[in-house]
Image: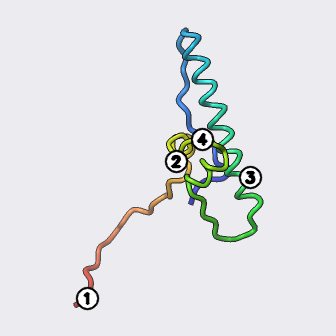
Amino acid sequence: MPILPLVPHVRGYRGGKRDLQLKNAEVHMQARRIADHVNCLIANDPGELQQYFFTSIARDLGVSVEVVRAAISSSLRPIEAPVTSFEPASK
């Protein structure tokens, strides 16, 4: 299960190039907008089980699927429990 609220995952730029600073700030704002949109969808849906597609989110916000995936995909990865034993299937 993802940890809520979703937060955008953007690499920061700490260099001195102004154009790269502006581009990074723009990417961060867009990622924040995507995360806020998904958090709003989750908060306004009373259902116990919710499913959202990157394509739907991208269409809602007018961005590409790749932008949505880059902004929030690491927030949506399920936490997997480690396998501690293996039992072969019965024949």
Residue 83: percent from left, percent from top: 36, 66
Q: Give the amino acid at mark 4.
A: Val
Q: Secondary structure at mark 1?
A: loop
Query: Which residue was labeled with disc 1?
Result: 90
Relative to 79, residue 60 above or below: above
Query: Which residue was labeled with disc 4?
Result: 63
Which quarter of the image is occupied by the N terminus?
bottom right
Mark 1 → mark 2, Cα distance in angstroms: 37 Å
> What residue is rendered at 57% in x and 13% in y?
19
Report if the CB atoms under discs 4 and 2 are less than 8 Å apart: no
Asked where in the image residue 35 lies, by quadrant, the reply is top right
Give the mark nearer the N terminus: 1 vs 2: 2
Q: Residue 40: which disc?
A: 3
Q: Nearer the viewer, mark 3 or mark 1?
A: 3
In this view, the residue farthest toward the bottom is: 91
Relative to 84, residue 71 above or below: above
Mark 3 → mark 2, Cα distance in angstroms: 17 Å
> What residue is rendered at 66% in x and 31% in y?
29
Q: Residue 73: which disc?
A: 2
